[in-house]
Amino acid sequence: MRSNELWLARHGETAWSLAGRHTGRTDVPLTPRGERQARALGERLRGAAFALVLASPLERARRTAELAGFGDALALDADLVELDYGAYEGRTRAEIQRARPDWDLWRDGCPGGETLAQAAARAERVLERVRAVDGAVLLVGHGHFTRTLATRALALSPDHGRHLALDPAGLSIVGAEHATPAIRLWNDARHLPDFD
């Protein structure tokens, strides 16, 4: 990246994220609480200037960006969609582990789904686009893919994403320290009051 920071926001809550269901390409909407989270994210980002704002075209991410106040500046990028979970789409970790007790997404992937290497290649395409921009960039996306993207921005192996928990509407920043990629903020949710 040039002199820019990469601001990463995960979409707000959905019924599937609340239930712990793997939500890849299924286009589920935000819950009412998720919409409130998106607006609170917008309040947190008020006054921040972005040279580029990108979001996944899936409704939960696109709508989060819109409710956060970036609808006019928003560009959609299909490379920001969530991982394709294949046969595990819609299933919880507990359901998957009943059949495969030692299953780990970051190691094993999903049958019939996208490999971690394929997701990392998409992340590299996003980073290439970001590197062409001078200034901070906001990316609004999904849990596992955003974690994969952060690993690539940090020049880490994609499976290190397992160490980067990311909550709905959480905000993270990847920048640099002494010209070395560095996490400046991770999974910050102080802008999210305990919505009922």
Image (cartoon, grey):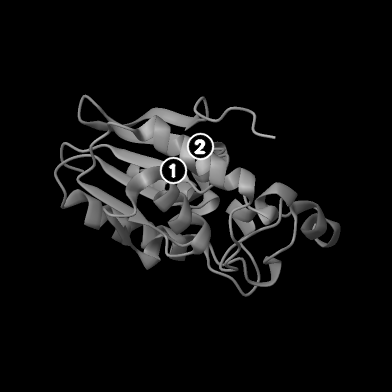
Identify the disc placed on residue 56: none
- Front position in the image: 196 or 123: 196
Answer whether residue 102 is visible to the viewer in this image.
no
Identify the disc placed on residue 170: 2
Direction bottom: furthest residue: 112
Tag 1 residue:
9
* Residue 97 in the figure: left or right of residue 80: right
- What percent of the width, then of the height, locates residue 144? 54, 51
At 63% across and 51% down in the image, what residue appears? Answer: 31
- Say which quarter of the image contains residue 111: bottom right
At 71% across and 50% down in the image, what residue appears? Answer: 20
Query: Callout 2: helix, strand or loop?
Result: loop
- Say which quarter of the image contains residue 120: bottom left
- Say which quarter of the image contains residue 96: bottom right
Query: Callout 1: helix, strand or loop?
Result: strand
User: Which amino acid, mark 1?
Assistant: Ala
Q: Earlier in the sequence, mark 2 or mark 1?
A: 1
At 85% across and 57% down in the image, what residue appears? Answer: 98
Asked if labels 1 and 2 touch by Cβ distance under 8 angstroms, the answer is yes
- Front position in the image: 1 or 169: 169
* Residue 171 in the figure: left or right of residue 176: right
